Amino acid sequence: MDCEDQNNENKKIRSIERALNVLLCFTVETPALSMTEISEMVGIHKSTVHRILATLESKNFIRREPETGVYRLGFCLLQMANLSLADVNIRHFSLPYMRLLNEEFRENVDLAIVDRDEVLFIDTFESTQPVKLAVSPGQHLPAYNSASGKAILAFLPNEEALRIIKKHNHDIETQNQLKLEAFLEDLRVTRDRGYALDCESLEVGVNAVAAPIFGLKNKPIASLAIAGPAYRLDCELMQKMGEKLIATNLEISKKILQAS
């Protein structure tokens, strides 16, 4: 590596270090900061801080409040924290309950988190019935039109839910107001009853019901879903499943919080 390449490499490393120092300015005591305050805390000129903040904001690591102009940590960091917590606790505490649900209803029981705006399935118990459906751990599905995803989206801040919906749905992105209102109404109903329904919207002949698992500060960090053929999962059964999922996830959430 010649001197010029080494200098370029050093500049990249310095830029990364500066960006991390900006993120570390945000604490429990200082959750919202102005650009001037950040500049003073990290000892960097405001023009440089402005460029760093713009880059972090474009990747959702930072968000700027339009009314006040102050900056806060973005939702991308929340998602990354949720992924870390999921790896440590969610699967460990959920598996015994998933087994019980699988034995009771004899349908697929799936555990999922939101990863980069999609649903990521991290574990599943397959149906014990002859006709069954299966998702594989590691499989991704759209968050906005799956029961597992909607169960989480419904309990996120509206701003974050809308960002995910608009990112992955072309009709919403092109300002289809009626479809947007239908999505928001579906999330409102989901939030009110405590569980989400998917009646053949993701795949013909497949129904699913899902409820969120909550972590710190009552944030949705995962969802537990029961899925099966539509002819077996009628409205009455899905209501029973939904109520069971709410009670089950309350127990899982308690265990996660106790371990945090």
Image: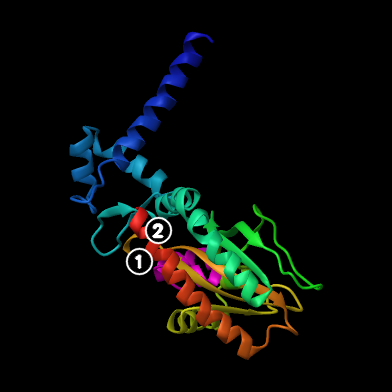
Residue identifier under label 1: 218
Name the residue located 52 percent from the left edge and 64 percent from the top edge: 164
Circles 1 and 2, Cβ within 8 Å, touching? The answer is no
Is the residue 156 above or below the residue 240 in the image?
Answer: above
Position of residue 130 measured from the top left corner of the image (x, y, whole percent): 81, 72
Report the amino acid beneath label 1. Asn
224 and 126: which is toward the camera: 126
Closest to the observer, 198 or 25 = 198
Q: Please rate how many residues cluster around mark 2, counting C-alpha atoms within 10 Å: few if below 14, some from 14 to 19, many from 20.
A: many
Residue 135's quadrant in the figure? bottom right
Q: Is residue 143 above or below residue 178?
A: above
The answer for how far apart the CA atoms under marks 1 and 2 are is 11 Å
- Residue type pointed to by label 2: Ile
Residue 180 visible somewhere in the drawing: no
Secondary structure beneath disc 2? helix
**Marking on residue 256:** 2
Residue 95 position in % (x across, y down): 55, 59
Query: In percent of the image, x 72 and y 69: which residue is there?
Result: 127
Residue 20 location, quadrant = top left
Q: Residue furthest right?
A: 130
Q: Is residue 242 above or below residue 119?
A: below
User: Taking the image as drawn, is residue 56 in sight?
Assistant: yes
Residue 244 badge: none
| Of callouts 1 and 2, the N-terminal one | 1
User: Residue 186 placed where, x, y %?
Assistant: 52, 81
Tell me the residue at 29%/40% (across/down).
24
Q: Nearer the viewer, mark 1 or mark 2?
A: 2
Residue 25 shown in magenta: no
- In this view, the residue in front, 253 or 192, is 253
Range covered by the magenta-colored residues:
149-165
Q: Nearer the viewer, residue 249 or 150?
A: 249
